[in-house]
Amino acid sequence: MKHRIQIISVSILFIVFIFAFALQEGLWSTTTDMRLWSHNTLPAKLSIERLGIYADIESVGVVDNAMAVPSNIEDVGWYQYGAHPGDQGSAVLAGHVNWTGGRSAVFTELHSIAIGDIVEVIDTGGSTHRFIVRSIRDYLMDNDTTEIFTSSDGLSRLNLITCDGVWDPVLQTHKSRLVVFTEKI
């Protein structure tokens, strides 16, 4: 019996060591991976009624070390490695502001959002998560955007991102990003 307890103790220490190593090397994230495994639902629909924005939500990851964008100009992309809308932390949704030839996209009117506006996310289970706009900011392309994707204040946040500013034909993108910061109500 004593030998069996020693083997179990060594096994547990080995597992703890492997887990700590994976955390340190960035191979595992307690805030991300556990969140992905613990949900039976995904964000499905976005609604900003005052602006007439109603969109499907698709899951997106990372492309070229940046958050990927939705594949459809009418949809928004949810950063699947972050918080789920309604969970503690910062969930992030991105959408196009326009498209080639000046065509409108899902967030064409996002510049008209105001502090106090209501944003809703409906998940695949039918639950509605309501958020209130608290602040609106512009970020230049080379600004640190860590605060958009993370928060440590214990609140449930939803941050919306779209392109803003002047179009750069060389880089094929706008020079800044409009970010809307909300918190759950």
Image: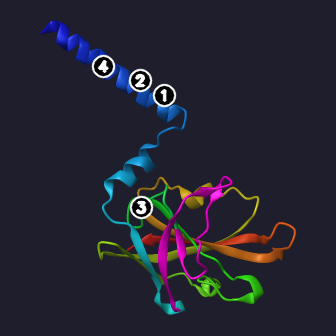
Picture coordinates of residue 64, whole percent (x, y): 68, 54
Badge 1 marks a residue whose secondary structure is helix
Q: Reading the chain from its start, which is encountered first: label 1 or label 4?
A: 4
Tell me if residue 56 is in the magenta stretch. yes
Residue with the mark numbered 3: 155
Which stretch did the figure color magenta? 52-77
Q: Is mark 3 on a helix, strand or loop?
A: loop
Residue under pointer 1: 21
What residue type is disc 4 on?
A: Ser
The image shows residue 32, relative to residue 97, as above or below, that is above
Name which residue type carries label 2. Answer: Phe
Q: Which residue is drawn at 42% across and 61% down?
A: 155
Q: How far separated are the C-alphas under marks 1 and 4?
A: 15 Å
Task: Answer whether labels 2 and 1 touch (C-beta < 8 Å).
Answer: yes
| Residue 100 spot, x, y in % from top left | 75, 83
Which residue has dot 2 on it?
17
